[in-house]
Image (cartoon, rainbow, N blue to C red):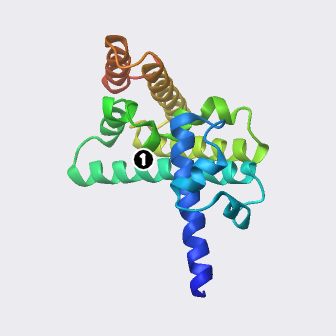
Amino acid sequence: MGHSQADKAASHRRIVEITSARLREHGLERPAIGELMREAGLTHGGFYRHFGSREELVEEAIVRALWDGARHMSEAVIRQRECGTDPLAALVAAYLSAAHRDDPTNGCAVATLGADVARASERTRAAYGNQVESYLRVLEGLIDESDPAVRRRRALLTLSAMVGALVMARAVGNSDLSAELLGRVAEGLTEGDPSS
């Protein structure tokens, strides 16, 4: 790859990474192309050398955000297994933490972008659905249950409870209710069968 092609690829990645973070922080309506390009250290006019439209950038950035979330989840599970701790309990605790609540820019895109993605393109919704399935497979692998149907039900309930609690904890702000949502749901998911 020539120097200019390598530079273009690096710029493209930087634009997508920045957009991915800003979408998790502000939603799909913001930020504007000019803002994103300035943050990437590029001119507004250079945008169309990388993307055909804002929608194309948003789709790619959402896929990137979802991929980042999957990577973080996998890395967390691997670290917990290496430490000998219960990976499911550790994953729930990390997901339902004040640190995750307070950092949507680097947080789970399934939680931050769900409502926006529901109104997005079919390609974007498919990427979101694939990520949800990926999370469910990870959770199913962590649930100590021999019956696959029960494992699947528990994974669905666990993921739904984690995402829902995180969304509500962010919505009510940094308050006692926010902390209670995170703490009580984490306790409920790790103290017993979340499907009972």
Choose between 151 and 160: the one closer to the eye.
160
Q: Secondary structure at mark 1?
A: helix
Percent x, y of residue 91: 35, 39
Sort mark 1 into few (<14), some (14-19) or many (20+) by Cα contacts within 10 Å. some
Q: Residue furthest bottom?
A: 2
Position of 119 with respect to 160 (left or right) is: right
Choose between 29 and 33: the one closer to the eye.
33
| Callout count | 1
Q: Is residue 152 visible?
A: yes
Q: Is residue 136 visible?
A: no
Report which residue position mark 1 lands on: 73
Vertical comparison of 191 with 129: above or below: above
Quadrant where the C terminus lies? top left
Quadrant where the N terminus lies? bottom right
Q: Amino acid at mark 1?
A: Met
Percent x, y of residue 140: 48, 41
Position of 33 with respect to 188 (left or right) is: right
Q: Residue at x 62, y 61 (%)?
A: 43
